[in-house]
Image (cartoon, rainbow, N blue to C red):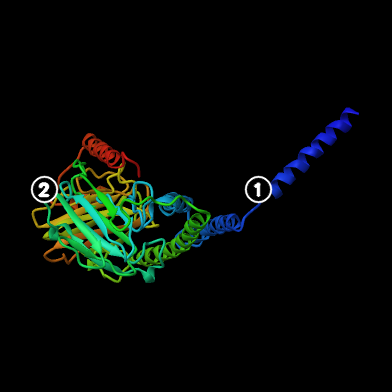
Amino acid sequence: MKILLYCLAALAVVVLTLYFAFFFNPQTEEQEEVNAAWSRFAEEVADLGRAIESAPFNRDEQTAAAGYRHIARYLSTFLAEYTDLRNPDYPQFSRFPNGVARVGWDNPDNPYLVFAVRGDHVYRLRGNTTSFDLVTINVYSGMLGHTPVRNIRTVSSIASDDLDVDENGDFVLTLSAVRAEGDWLKLEPDAHIVVVRRLVSDWEKTYEGLWEILNLTTLGTGAPRPTPESVARSLDDAVTQTRSLRELLTLAHRITFQLRLRPNTVEEPAESDPNLAMADAFQAGARGYFRLDEDEALLVDVPVADCRYTNIQLANPWMESLDYASHQSSLNHRTAHADADGRVRYVISGRDPGVQNWLDTAGWAEGSLCARWTYCSEYPTGINARVVKLDELDRYLPPETVRVSPAERARIVAARQAAISRRYAGGS
């Protein structure tokens, strides 16, 4: 009898559960659309791994692991972007690229700020230039990894040299379709994203000052709470971004594959093309690729140029910057030493050669490099690159080469780690 009662009680629970599920918690059309949007997003993420598997340079476990970590980092950032931050009606700053999500030779000297806009609204940007060599502000019609690359163009640009900066380093900039009083940056109907590049060559300068972005069109109104429609729309935006991320990875594949055909060479600088996706209108860049044995170094010598800012950095085959906090994988005009003949000689290797201008490959036998020249009177020509044995390196370096002891190197790396910790103290 007890067994029968237990069975009847269990049956009653099941019946009641089904009754409440069907009659008191029905799936509305909006709920079903959110569920479907989530399923679409999950399917796109699952398919994203194929872009890593199919990369022509993905030939070992280290490269594969870095590739999967690369997309995982990217996904972790853009999910926050598209569910919370990337709202042009109520914009917020996001740091992208950042210390976690790194993409497209992200610059270690650049604590980026990004915010969303729409062409028919008016925005006010406040900022401070005190700690920065130069601040550039570019409006784009899309964002790498979200908008198809072919659809991204530079809408408008301005640099801190052209802003009315007060004695404290503060400025105010209006962004709108119609010209405004004071400093102004034009928005057009396809304006989508604003990227603020804040170049800092001295990492000890950690004061960022006041930065604020307000939409004057919606200022003082309450942001609506998330709805099934808005969440579904955000997830569909994430689907679009995931597809565009696959396109971005394919672009990285093509660039890296082309560079790998000419290992241990560096291109001559080329000015940014305003029609090139996410280009900075105020700089020129050069690319290269290293492929080295443990006992080898790539010696790159570059003429000194009359520029506000220059740098060189290393990246893995996915064009993701190396760990620039724990490795000296980047140098700029302040941290690199120029020789008496007017050239800067960089030594790229996995083993510390004991010179100031060492670029640490951080365990990578091959990878890419990127150099930048910003706000220059003219760009350098005549970049040389050659592979040498580390044991014979001194034969190719001038007498005034600055040497660095292991203890000094440890202090340099510790200072980099502390600087990056301070930079991202508020989060990546």
Where the N terminus falls, by quadrant? top right
Answer whether labels 2 and 1 touch (C-beta < 8 Å).
Answer: no
Kindly report the distance in space between the C-alpha atoms of the residues bearing marks 2 and 1.
78 Å
Q: Amino acid at mark 1?
A: Asn
Q: Which mark is residue 110?
A: none
Q: Which residue is mark 2?
A: 400
**SS type, badge 2:** loop
Asked if residue 240 can be seen in this view, the reply is yes
Give 398 or 219, whichever is nearer the viewer.
219
Task: Give the percent coordinates (x, y) of residue 10.
Answer: 80, 36
Q: Residue furthest top?
A: 2
Position of residue 116 in the picture relative to residue 286 (left or right): right
Q: Which mark is residue 25?
A: 1
What residue is drawn where x is 17% and y is 42%? 403
Q: Amino acid at mark 2?
A: Glu
Quarter holding residue 104: bottom left
Give 208 or 124, whichever is nearer the viewer.
124
Task: Give the percent coordinates (x, y) of residue 342.
Answer: 10, 57
Quarter holding residue 217: bottom left
What residue is drawn where x is 67% and y is 47%? 24
Give 165 or 356, whichever is nearer the viewer.
165
